[in-house]
Image: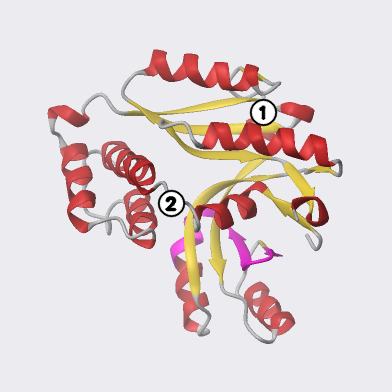
Amino acid sequence: MSGHSKWSTIKRQKESKDARRGQIFTKLGNAITVAVRAGGGIGDPEKNFKLRLAMEKARSLNMPKETIQRAIKRGEGSKEGSNWVEIVYEGYGPEGIAVVVETTTDNRNRTTSEIKNLFERGGGSLASPGAVSFQFKKMGLITVEKGEKLDDQILSLIDLGAEDVEEANDALEVYNKPDRTREMRNKIEGLGFKVLGEELVMQPVNLVRIEDKVKAEKVLKFMENLEEHDDVQKVYANFDIAQEILK
């Protein structure tokens, strides 16, 4: 990965500087509500793994405790939360990149129409379910702060049983099977390494290299437009942009 950045890395760095807190909190609240509903109405993060991850994400971005609790209550059975569902869209973006979009919505028709429009305006197109997702694999991602002895740190993480360890500009990305995420996090913290984040992701199997500035700008604008949609939770893509272009 040296000299290149994936969307997951670019998005993480952008998110830490994003001042649009109102929109972020709305999205996080929706994710918490849907996590509770998907878990059978269980609002206890110790018994609902997806909820735990959503709450940790919210806390990492300083979402108020009361707002988190309201989102949980909404998912536990209030009438306000009964229509919220999670929908995943697949498609192709500019330069033929594969894209998976995770959304939460209380209006399926509206969201589908708007996501379709964003794909088409960006030079891509929506595809049927399964047309793109085979180019990704579901993984647990633990983001770890880099240590002074980077090579030794990477070897230690591999020795713990990590499926893959990738160096990004701002951190180490440690991939593992989804059902081992909590176990791996505990092991990593047991070695004294600082965990910056934990989530379930779709990891690209093969990356499309973007080496041209104009093409990179088009791809990034398309991705940002998707990310900024109120119903969108996460966007995964299989492109890789050269670092000198990003600078």
Answer whether residue 126 is visible to the viewer in this image.
no
In depth, the one of 198 and 49 nearer the eye is 198
Task: Check the picture and name the quadrant holding the N terminus.
Answer: bottom right
Q: Amino acid at mark 1?
A: Val
Query: Is residue 111 shown to the viewer in this render?
Result: yes
Point 71% across, 40% down: residue: 238
* Position in image of residue 63 (x %, y %): 30, 55
| Residue 229 location (% of width, % of height) | 47, 31
Q: Is residue 172 magenta?
A: yes
**Amino acid residing under circle 2:** Ala
> Which residue bears the numbered disc 2?
19
Residue depicted at x 51% and y 68%: 184
Q: Element under label 2? A: loop
Picture quarter with the C terminus:
bottom right
- The residue that label 1 is drawn on is 132
- For marks 2 and 1, the one nearer the N-term is 2
Q: Is residue 244 magenta?
A: no
Categorize mark 1 by other alpha carbons within 10 Å: few (<14), some (14-19), many (20+). Answer: some
Measured as percent of width and height from the top left, residue 5 is found at 72, 54
Q: Eyeballing the image, is 89 above or below 17?
A: above
The extreme left residue here reads: 78
Checking the image for residue 41, the label placed there is none
Residue extent of the magenta highlight: 165-182
Picture coordinates of residue 4, whole percent (x, y): 78, 56
